[in-house]
Image: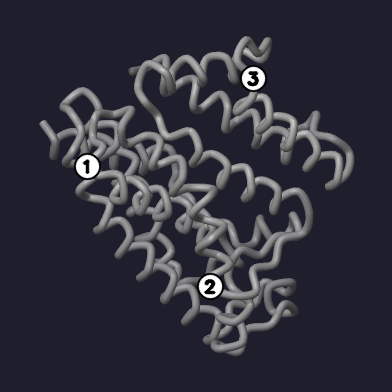
Amino acid sequence: MRPAVHALYAFVRQADELVDGPGRPPDPAARREALDNLESELFEGRGSSNPAVAALIDAAARHDLPLEELRAYMDSMRVDCGPVRMATRDDLDVYMNGSAAAVGRVMAPLLGAPAATESFARLGVAFQLTNFIRDVREDWELDRMYLAREDFARWGVCDEEILRREATAGFRSLMAEEVGRARELFADGAAAVASVGPGVRPGMQMARAVYLRVLDRVERLEYDVLARRAALSPWEASRVMLGSLRATA
């Protein structure tokens, strides 16, 4: 199981590096072309010299993995090649279906839990949405805003407030809504954690516990993720991980 997980990670990481890595192609069009080539190599590349592609093709054959899901992942990576603005919540959901849910759907059969595929997908989206909540300021500096423009309008949030790092009442209400949504997704993803074997469950439970604590921190900051990043200190993350291990022992 472990080599197959490594192969999946290597492939999606390689795609991510084409978008954000220090050696990425110089412009959005070139990045999208590089992603196109990588995707073609995966789906047409038996005998590929790319070790990540070769390993993932082998893992898919051994574990009957639904690699077609990764087409949606690559679509989301193409979105990230240039400035990002999500017009609607549906647009955001389509993006997260590719960037997170698709990988969860590949992981479910790999971890021996095909019956929990959609729970894995929702758990993946919970992780992704928590990242977006935590990283509003950092994403803005990269000319990316993943939260939907229609939600900005509904809560009366404008770009100038983000630029000034001004957490208005509307911005805080929007963040509170997204935190609630992420918590619902984590609750739905609990079945994924319960469905895997004892060798896998502690790691999944630790990741889930750490991300839930990030949401706790956002709430303690009263949803102001503009003035201060809602990251956990190393000691706090370690304490959460130890607590989750005790709970699963």
Front-most of 130 and 97? 97
Q: Label 2 crowding class (10 Å Cα cut-off): few <14, some 14-19, many 20+? A: some
Considering only order in the chain, which callout, 2 or 1, is on the residue closer to the N terminus? 2
Q: Residue at x 54, y 58 (%)?
A: 132
Residue linked to disc 1 = 115
Q: Amino acid at mark 3?
A: Gly
Residue 17 placement (x, y as % from top left): 69, 33
Discs 1/3, front: 3
Vertical arrangement, residue 159 with respect to residue 244, above or below: below
Front-most of 110 and 213? 110
Q: Secondary structure at mark 2?
A: helix
Q: Residue at x 43, y 64 (%)?
A: 218
In this rendering, position of residue 93 left or right of residue 52 = left
Q: Label 3 crowding class (10 Å Cα cut-off): few <14, some 14-19, many 20+? A: some
Query: Residue 126 appears in which quarter of the rendering?
Result: bottom left
Residue linked to disc 3 = 45
Q: Secondary structure at mark 3?
A: loop
Residue 116 placement (x, y as % from top left): 24, 44
The colour style of the image is one colour
Asked if marks 2 and 3 touch (Cβ < 8 Å), the reply is no
In this rendering, position of residue 214 left or right of residue 31 = left
Residue 89: give its label: 2
